[in-house]
Image (cartoon, helix red, strand yellow):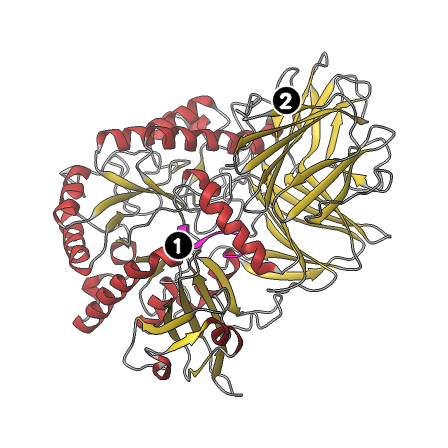
Amino acid sequence: MPRAFLPVILLSLSMSTTAFSQAPSSIRIETHNNLLLLGVDTGHQLKQLYYGRQMADAVSSATTGEAAYPVYGTGHESREVALRLTHSDGNLTSRLVYVDHSVSRPDANTVLTTIHLKDSYYPVQVSLYYKAYTNEDVIEQWTEVRHQEKGPVTLFDFASAGLSFSSQSYYLNYFYGDWANEFNLIETPLTPGVKVIDSKLGVRVNQRSNPSFLLSLNGQLQEDGGEVIGGSLAWPGNWQLKFDVDDQKKLNVLCGINPYGSQYALPAGTVFRTPSLLYTYSPEGAGTVTRRFHRWARKYGILDGYGSRDVLLNNWEATYFDFDETKLTTIIQEAGKMGFELFLLDDGWFGNKYPRNNDDAGLGDWQVNKKKLPHGIPYLVKTCQENHLKFGIWIEPEMVNPRSELYEKHPDWVITAPNRDLSLQRNQLILDLSNPEVVEYVYSSIDKLLSENKGISYIKWDCNRYVTNPGSHYLGKDRQTHLFIDYPKALLQIMERVRKKFPETTMMVCSGGGGRIDYASLPYFQEYWPSDNTDAADRIRIQWGLGYFFPSIGLASHVSNIPNGFTGRTESLKFRFDVSLAAKLGMDLQPNQMNEADKQFSRNAIQTYKDIRDVVMHGDLYRLISPYSGNPSTYAGDRAALSYVSEDGARAIVFAYQMKKSITGNSIQLRLKGLDPKAGYTFKELNKGSYSRVKAYEGRRFSGEYLMTQGVVFDMYNDYESAVFQLTRQ
């Protein structure tokens, strides 16, 4: 699984290793269905010769390829470069030449190719790593830079990877939005010039976009056809995706840490490791890219990707900060009766001198509030156990309120620029993780909470602001630009320590919603919170965009109150459940806010989810009807449908939604995907409401071929209607 920016060289334990002493005609980085072909030209320059579908006899000339890792100062000045540095003597230029490469097999499914380059004059070494996941058709690439110059070498650009393409046209699909409006899919043609998608937020860096992209060659993005490259950068810090088209229609793609405000003085003998870029090529559209990423993620990219997840009840919308033991006990008892498996205590449980009764105090003081919880966390754990529930708790360990004991003792521990007023967001500041003392405090706070309160089985790790007034008291005046690199590096180290000591604790990564969903963080977490916006209609769109790269096994989706606190919409309980059933089910809607009929419906829905969650969590995703109505740049918002098919093809769970009535008719035709055309499938409606739109199909058997060509046809008449059904192979 990806690891970013480690301080030492990692040596792979391999089954076999082959070394090469002379420049080869070609270097094959390959999976079952993909081939990346590299070569070395007569000037000892490493070139990308080919990237696309697997071909056993692929041959190309290194004289016609593009630089595999372009550097500044020796012929690439007209193009964007992967590496730009200043040597200790002030020389701005670099020229990398091939040294050697090796191939190892860490396990039966992965092949690691390491290519060593060096500067033709200076003692600077650059190593390119390509880890090919054979069965999943995913390549993971990262870079290491080191040197033995007399003084520091200053890095100005340091991409993880570069890829080159030559096509008639390019369409870029990426994700954009903001808090409570995450993961909007945007499509734009790439014209000559440079297109940059990036984040400069420092922390919570995915709030407005995500470091993932879909690149469609020779036409707009299609779900089931056309050449598509999907890529995702594994990094929780500032990131940059750069697309450079020249006047010959050649495209150079560079992905990595955002160099903005982040020049890095690298001492001799120290390794600078970039984060990993994960990518795949599909000649069969975006759907194949998604299923490859999801299968890879379940095995390598998210913790316990083939395990199960508990159905959770959160107290937040019921109490906010206003709770005590009595209120929580009532909620826990009701949760046990409803069939929930986990109770999560959200924000507000800590702080004594500065009690956390609002969002303006207490952050950083991780002691239990004695007034709210006189018997402490063990009482709540015991109460949960008596009601057949696990217990979870919310933390925000990277943050501090000015009204806190921690800030009173250590005002120098926060990120802020000298000679500037404090810049607050949500009444809080960010702790400076470039400072080892702060790192130890943050880790120790989590360690103490879990060690002293046995029975906490779940952590919601939140992060509710981004960096403004960047500055570090610890780094000193000559290393201020290291902050945006050292912070995420330290954060990942904390996550790794916590996970190593508490391997049985389930953790959700949350960052004011989807602000920290990346494949550097997710190997330490089982779940992720995609958005604070829990409106079901909006969640269809948010979850649709997120699902291109991130699997449903971790996608927390909660049934919420109505009218919704964000949108004011009122949607039926069935519609809200049907949206959440397509992910990892949870609830903020409280049992004591329901009538008996709604309680019974919820009990049945929770049980339905338990019966199908193995397919939803571990199945292959097929998108059937897009809420973007064929144009990713325009969210039409009227209909959407998707399905999950078990990896063995035996079961499919289908979800259909109508968000808006259509004046041209409301008939829906779902042509299914991923089924065995020769097998028979029995139809069963799930999570039924007071009426059924698909009763004509109930209990009937259809061939996979019929379901994929003729499909299921039915009407939905009203705003916010939905239908869910199961197909079981006989």
List the single residue furthest toward the top.
Answer: 150
Q: Position of residue 680 (x, y in %)?
A: 41, 71
Which residue corresponds to mark 1?
Answer: 617
Q: Can you say which quadrant of the picture contains the C terminus?
A: bottom left
Q: Is residue 211 above or below residue 536?
A: above
Q: Residues within 10 Å of mark 2 (few under 14, many from 20)?
A: few
At label 2, which amino acid type do we have? Asp
Q: Position of residue 406 (x, y in %)?
A: 35, 30
Element class at badge 2: loop
User: Splitting the image into 4 quarters, where does residue 285 fall?
Assistant: bottom right
Residue 663 counted in the magenta span? no
Please give the label number shown on residue 204: none
Please check the rendered image and state whether residue 549 is part of the magenta-colored stretch, yes or no: yes
Magenta segment boundaries in residue numbering: 547-555
Residue furthest to the bottom: 664
> Measuring 33% from the left and 79% from the top, which residue is drawn there?
698
Helix, strand or loop at mark 1: helix
Residue 611 vertical position relative to residue 151 in the rendered view, above or below: below
Look at mark 2 in the image and give the residue it sits on: 478
Magenta segment, prevailing SS (helix, strand or loop) = loop
Hey, what amino acid is under mark 1?
Answer: Met
